[in-house]
Amino acid sequence: MNAAGDVVALTQALIARPSVTPDDAGCQDLIADRLAAAGFRIERLDQGEVRNVWAEHGDGGDVLVFLGHTDVVPPGPRADWRSDPFEPTLRDGVLYGRGAADMKGSVAAFVVALEQFVAAHPQHPGTIALLLTSDEEGDAIDGVRYVAERFRREGRRIDFCITGEPSSKQRLGDLLRVGRRGTLTGSLVVHGIQGHVAYPEKARNPIHALAPALAELCARQWDDGYPEFPPTSFQVSNLTAGTGAGNVIPGRCELVCNFRYNPGWTAPALEAEVVAVLARHGLQYDLRWHRGGEPFLTGEGRLRVAARAALTELCGGSPEENTGGGTSDARFIAPLGAEVVELGPINASIHKVDEHIALAELERLPALYRAVAERLLLA
């Protein structure tokens, strides 16, 4: 089978495994067996219910890792899909299925690129590796976060990391992610006193208490951006209260919010700002924070140079380089001192019904990943 057919067949085999986070559904076993046959050393780094696998070839020198995940988000109602989300389906040059773009296509391309690389350069300098987890779309506790902490304790180094997240916008390779904003999630419970709406003097409405504080948080311009980063944003993702009855003042109001923040802030500083707002408005509340990851930026260096050159040569143009979008497991690798970029297919259909990837795009990915590896390790 040629490389183009191989990457399509492997992507189909991965899509057919319903690996809804944190279930791996056998994806990593399939990949580990292939890479072991190609001469890679396989190390299982499982934690709890989460599957993590590290496959490496070579020894010493610069360490380049391809980073991916085998888990996917739930498909939602299957009746909404034109074809079963876990039955890979080809229509008009497009491959459909949950995970096609996010990110089983990239994972399959990693595998094919790695096989090609070691076949062409069996005595290559440095170390080339693949790290996969089944906990990227979920809690992201026992996946790459756990592996990175373990590597730090053990003194294991990663110099370069290519994450296969779907980063492209209109065509393959038109965008190179060179960093990400930090993410901070707050879970707030505002306490009131339940009562009858006709007797508000005997109750305390937590919605009314929260509203002015929330308006202040939403209206605030947190900053004007940071070099190579967009402005910090605050968003409410969930807001619930009430008993369902129209004549009852609720006793509590619950809110979930999120900051996506640039290096002008730290998580503790943002937390302190929110607490100060709540205190000014006299709220009675409980507040829990989840620090999902600090912002990071890969400056101009060998990885950005290599990725830019490969994209320019193979994709027909120099990419836009930015730090926008959401977040990824790269946030756990960057603090190890690694240069990190995100490079993958078009992201228009990710997490949606009828998720898909164009075959022409998928078939080009292995050569792109291999080209970056050769520029880094063989230069």
Image (tube, helix red, strand yellow):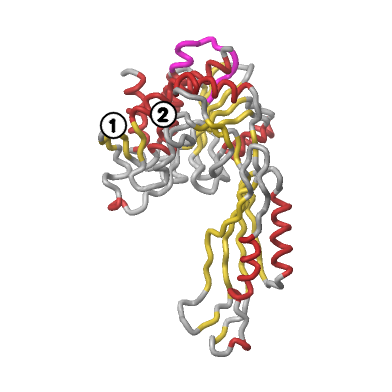
Amino acid at pointer 1: Gly
- Where residue 91 appears, x then y in whole percent? 26, 36
Residue at 38% over, 29% down: 361
Could you say which is closer to the camera, residue 362 or residue 251? Answer: 362
Which one is in front in this view, the residue at disc 2 or the one at disc 1? 1
Mark 2 to mark 1 CA distance (whole Å): 18 Å
Quarter of the view holding residue 147: top right
For residue 353, side relative to residue 115 (left or right):
left
Callout count: 2
Relative to 26, residue 188 above or below:
below
- Where residue 265 appears, x then y in whole percent? 71, 47
The kind of secondary structure element at disc 1 is loop
Residue at 37% over, 49% down: 75
Q: Which residues are magenta?
A: 116-129
Graded by Cα atoms within 10 Å as few (under 14), some (14 to 19) or many (20 or more), the crowding at tag 1 reads: few
Relative to 236, residue 285 above or below:
below
Name the residue beneath numbered marker 2.
Answer: 108
Amino acid at pointer 2: Ala
Name the residue beneath numbered marker 1.
Answer: 93
Residue 15 visible in the displayed image: yes
Residue at 66% over, 29% down: 299
